[in-house]
Image (tube, helix red, strand yellow):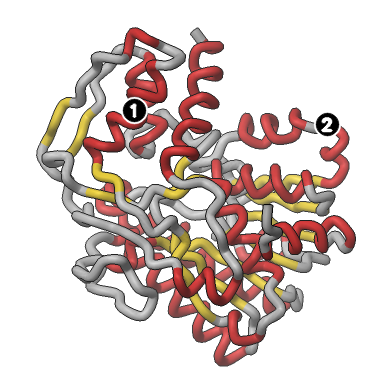
């Protein structure tokens, strides 16, 4: 098999470890980053306030190889506090900023909280990184910044009007990053995530993401709700692809690649009816009783875009990104992971 840029970077990191700060480390993306970095022998500081993350995500990672615990230090706290951001940043080489208050519906219900967690905290991270002379910050943006722009696939240079407070916060983060790069010379790279899914994603609560929520509902014999007629489509991206993109962005030595924002998806589209069928059929292999389940339908939700698909040409060309999992492969791994754990709880 041909070696990829990601293979090369991982080998380089094993030979020359760095000190990393992962914010939002108790979330499912943050914990996946922690898992990979510890696997590569890196030293990691993790920050989380447990507003949306869970301590069991960290424990799950540390249980994989207990010896790696020595390479990890956890700081519990809220990045809306500039003192905490400054404390976490000491002696750090690279920041992977994942901490945020996600969910479009949540932001519509409470726009002030979304702004505080997503903008105020991000500004604290940027300033703390600047003061600490951190070499690079990679931050999570979102496909929601494309708003009402009709073009498909989404291309980084063309964004529309935001459709939710959450989308506004992510666009503001990108603008702050651009200014800090241009004015202060900070090395910053943004990644616009497209509907990330995978192990440890939270299946519970009113703002749970659709994939873990549907897996849990199917196993519990509860209805899976589709908002709208099911024709809405998304570029679902497995979490291991997101981990790859973060590590590539964190380590690129090309000056032209820095100070930019990149789509992070698979350049595919799956509508919600197809998604339901994919989850049900994968789960039926382990739980045959779900094989005949059908979704229920409710009116569309405000703030939801109709279609989303990432052009990934820019990140492929600039960073050597090469997704290892398309939606079907990622879904098979995700369903298997959740099925094993949710059944264990019964």
Residue behind mark 1:
214
Residue 312, compared with residue 73, is above or below; it is: below
Question: Where is residue 182 shown, x and y percent of the image?
Answer: 55, 90
Badge 2 density bin: few <14, some 14–19, many ≥20, Cα 10 Å: few
Residue 201, compared with residue 321, is above or below; it is: above
Residue 150, compared with residue 65, is above or below; it is: below
Horizontally, is 243 left or right of 168 in the view? right
As rendered, which of 126 and 303 lies closer to the eye?
303
Q: Mark 2 and mark 1: span between their CA atoms?
A: 32 Å
The residue depicted at 67 percent of the width and 82 percent of the height is 254
Dot 2 or dot 1: first in sequence order is: 2
Q: In the rendered image, which quarter is residue 203 located in?
A: top left
Question: Where is residue 138 shown, x and y percent of the image?
Answer: 60, 67
Q: In the rendered image, which quarter is residue 327 located in?
A: top left
Secondary structure type for disc 2 = helix
Residue 13, compared with residue 213, is above or below; it is: below
Q: In the rendered image, which quarter is residue 165 located in?
A: bottom left
As rendered, which of 185 and 39 lies closer to the eye?
39
The residue depicted at 80 percent of the width and 46 percent of the height is 72
Residue 283 seen from this side:
yes
The residue depicted at 73 percent of the width and 64 percent of the height is 89
Badge 1 density bin: few <14, some 14–19, many ≥20, Cα 10 Å: many
Q: Which mark is residue 53?
A: none
Residue behind mark 2:
66
Horizontally, is 313 left or right of 47 in the view? left
Question: Where is residue 295 shown, x and y percent of the image?
Answer: 20, 25
As rendered, which of 136 and 206 lies closer to the eye?
136
As rendered, which of 185 and 113 lies closer to the eye?
185
Number of disc labels:
2
Horizontally, is 125 left or right of 192 in the view? right
Secondary structure type for disc 1 = helix
Residue 87 seen from this side:
no
């Amino acid at each position: 098999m041909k070696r990829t840029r990601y293979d090369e970077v991982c080998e380089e990191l094993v030979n020359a470890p760095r000190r990393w700060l992962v914010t939002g480390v108790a979330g499912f993306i943050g914990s996946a980053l922690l898992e990979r970095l510890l696997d590569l022998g890196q030293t990691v500081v993790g920050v989380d306030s447990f507003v949306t993350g869970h301590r069991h995500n960290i424990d799950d990672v540390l249980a994989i190889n207990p010896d790696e615990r020595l390479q990890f230090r956890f700081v519990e706290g809220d990045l809306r506090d500039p003192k905490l951001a400054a404390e976490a940043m000491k002696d750090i080489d690279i920041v992977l900023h994942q901490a945020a208050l996600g969910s479009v519906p949540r932001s519509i219900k409470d726009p002030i909280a979304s702004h505080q967690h997503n903008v105020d905290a991000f500004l604290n991270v940027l300033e703390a990184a600047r003061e600490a002379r951190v070499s690079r910050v990679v931050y999570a943006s979102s496909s929601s910044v494309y708003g009402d722009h009709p073009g498909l696939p989404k291309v980084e240079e063309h964004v529309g009007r935001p459709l939710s407070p959450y989308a506004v916060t992510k666009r503001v983060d990108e603008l702050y990053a651009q200014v800090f790069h241009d004015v202060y010379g900070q090395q910053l790279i943004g990644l616009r995530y497209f509907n990330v899914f995978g192990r440890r994603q939270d299946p519970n609560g009113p703002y749970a993401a659709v994939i873990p929520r549907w897996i849990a509902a199917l196993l519990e014999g509860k209805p899976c709700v589709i908002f709208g007629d099911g024709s809405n489509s998304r570029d679902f991206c497995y979490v291991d692809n997101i981990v790859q993109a973060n590590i590539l962005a964190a380590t690129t030595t090309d000056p032209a690649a820095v100070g930019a924002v990149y789509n992070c998806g698979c350049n595919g589209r799956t509508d919600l009816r197809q998604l339901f069928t994919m989850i049900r059929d994968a789960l039926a292999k382990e739980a045959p009783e779900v094989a005949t389940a059908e979704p229920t339908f409710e009116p569309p939700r405000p703030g939801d875009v109709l279609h989303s698909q990432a052009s990934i040409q820019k990140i492929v060309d600039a960073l050597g990104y090469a997704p290892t999992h398309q939606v079907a492969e990622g879904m098979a791994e995700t369903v298997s992971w959740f099925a094993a754990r949710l059944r264990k709880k019964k």
